Amino acid sequence: MPIAPIAEDASALMADYGLASYDAVHAASAIAARAEAIATTDTGFALLPASLLRVYTDRSRVAACRALRPQR
């Protein structure tokens, strides 16, 4: 996968949604790979709207993710 588009998309995700750089790189890579979802224990991914990437996490982090998730 080419790095340049991922870097540009990661920068946009950081600016638009407040993702940390490492989360933005993972999210941009998942989106570029046409993934519909990501499984993680990192609640930072909840900052993305579900239309970009669904987040699957363990039960102990669901409330924290819902609190961060942008409202429609």
Image (cartoon, helix red, strand yellow):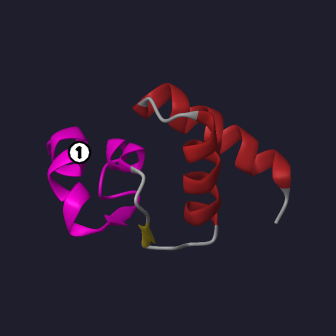
Classify 3 as above or below 68: below
Is residue 7 magenta-colored? Answer: no
Q: Which span is picked out in magenta?
A: 43-72
The reply, left or right, for residue 54 in relation to residue 64 is right
Disc 1 crowd rating (10 Å Cα; few below 14, some 14-19, many 20+) is: some
Task: Say how many tags the image has.
Answer: 1
The reply, left or right, for residue 40 in relation to residue 25 is left
Q: Residue at x 74, y 42 (%)?
A: 7
* Image spot of residue 50 (x, y percent): 29, 57
Amino acid type at circle 1 is Arg
Residue 30: which quarter of the image?
Answer: bottom right
Residue 47: which quarter of the image?
Answer: top left
The reply, left or right, for residue 36 in relation to residue 20 is left
**SS for dot 1:** loop
Report the residue marked by disc 1: 69
Q: Residue at x 20, y 67 (%)?
A: 59
* Image spot of residue 6 (x, y percent): 72, 50
For the residue pair 54 and 12, the one nearer the viewer reads as 54
Q: Residue at x 54, y 34 (%)?
A: 20
Quarter of the image containing the C terminus?
top left
Residue 52: which quarter of the image?
Answer: bottom left
* Image spot of residue 46 (x, y percent): 32, 48
For the residue pair 53 and 66, the one nearer the viewer reads as 66
Quarter of the image containing the N terminus?
bottom right
Q: Residue at x 19, y 58 (%)?
A: 62
Classify 62 as above or below 24: below
Is residue 51 magenta-colored? Answer: yes
